[in-house]
Image (spheres, grey):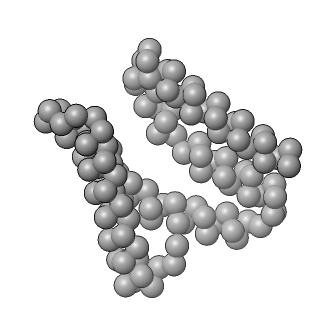
Amino acid sequence: MLQYIAKIIVSAILIAVVSELAKRNSIWAATLASLPLISLLAFIWLYIETGDANRIATLAQGIFWLVLPSLVLFILLPILLRAGWNFWPSLLASCIATAGAYAAMAWLLSRFGVRV
């Protein structure tokens, strides 16, 4: 239970730091947010809890493949906002497009026999 609480606290602190930093300096906030901190924490927690390096390797491979469709969000959102769309419709459209990209990637990976 203590590990679970620690996970929540560390994750919450990272999210809070990025959002506060973004108010002051967007490049540092973007740098921190772009680091694979969640992935690193997931690897660490998974290893501490299971000691299974193969599970970590499988998770890392899955993350690699699924980072690619997640880029749709970071490409489309600024385009829509700069085109004059309001924030919420831009975010919704970007999320829907990203979900579509995830579905397309899952289909593509299955066609090539890649298991995530």
Q: Is residue 65 left or right of residue 54?
A: left
Q: Is residue 52 visible?
A: yes
Q: Quadrant of residue 108?
A: bottom left
Q: Is residue 111 left or right of residue 58?
A: left
Q: Position of residue 50 (x, y in %)?
A: 81, 63
Circle count: 0
Q: Is residue 72 left or right of residue 38?
A: left
Q: Is residue 79 visible?
A: no
Q: Position of residue 56 (x, y in %)?
A: 67, 63
In terms of depth relative to the viewer, which is nearer, 71 or 77? Answer: 77
Extreme residue in the top direction: 24
Name the residue: 54% across, 45% down: 36
Q: Is residue 52 left or right of residue 75?
A: right
Q: Looking at the image, is 79 positioned above or below residue 55?
A: above
Q: Looking at the image, is 9 positioned above or below residue 27?
A: below
Q: Looking at the image, is 68 positioned above or below residue 58?
A: above
Extreme residue in the left direction: 83
Q: Position of residue 32 (x, y in %)?
A: 51, 32
Name the residue: 81% across, 54% down: 48
Q: Position of residue 70 (x, y in %)?
A: 38, 54
